[in-house]
Amino acid sequence: MTESAGVAVFSRKHAGSDRKEFRAIGAIDAAPLTVRRVLDDAEAYPAFMPYVKESRVLSRHGDVAVCYQRIAPPVIGERDYTLKVQSEIQRQGGGAANYLRRWELANDLGPAPSVGVGRLTLDEGSWLLEPSADGKTRATYTIYCDAASSLPTMVLDMANQTAIPKLFDAIRKQAKLEKYRTGL
């Protein structure tokens, strides 16, 4: 476990793979619905999410969205992927709600690969947003992916350890904007 910027990052080997799965837990000073609105605003990701160059929703049917993203993290270069994202509301006693957002790779539902851009072949994860007694959100982020890179796994794991707290910081800053607190 490492801790940075108020985010505890855990990793473990994924069964049957040399790649690690990461789980991060941290507080976000906003209600879970506000954080959900930030995460739902995929079109705005290039303006605030680390390394995201392009993000667009290709389709949305009820609680399922298909999203295409192109990222440009340091060292490994540009990568792209299409995700199928499922959102759920889990009601608690007293009317409170947890928000769960899970995704899996769905490259067959997105654009063809671009020349010079690596295509991810594995990307699955989730966000769980839970209310805390102080009005904040306890956010749990999980990710298991292949960076489509020939870099050693150890280097890629270190990159995740650095990038995940930046992701939380970006969401924390965005959640302060009034448009997310009152709805889009």
Image (spheres, helix red, strand yellow):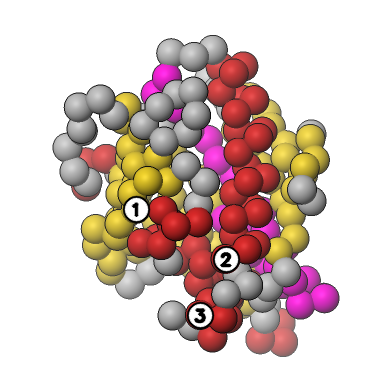
Q: Residues within 10 Å of mark 2 (few under 14, many from 20)?
A: many
For the record, the magenta segment spans: 127-149
Give the residue at x 29% y 29%. Answer: 117
Q: Gap in Å between the C-alphas at discs 1 and 2?
A: 16 Å
Residue ID for mark 1: 55
Residue 38 in picture, x, y percent from top left: 51, 67
Mark 2 → mark 3, Cα distance in angstroms: 9 Å
The residue tagged 2 is 174
Q: Residues within 10 Å of mark 3 (few under 14, many from 20)?
A: few
Q: Residue 134 colored magenta? A: yes
Chain-order first, disc 1 or disc 3: 1
Q: Quadrant of the C terminus?
A: bottom left
Left-right relation of 29 to 79: right
Say which amino acid is labelled 3: Lys
Q: Identify the mark nearer the N-term, 1 or 2.
A: 1
Q: Residues within 10 Å of mark 1 (few under 14, many from 20)?
A: many
Q: Earlier in the sequence, mark 2 or mark 3?
A: 2
Residue 179: which numbered mark, if any? 3
Are the residues tagged 1 and 2 within 8 Å (C-beta)? Answer: no
Residue at left 50%, top 63%? 39
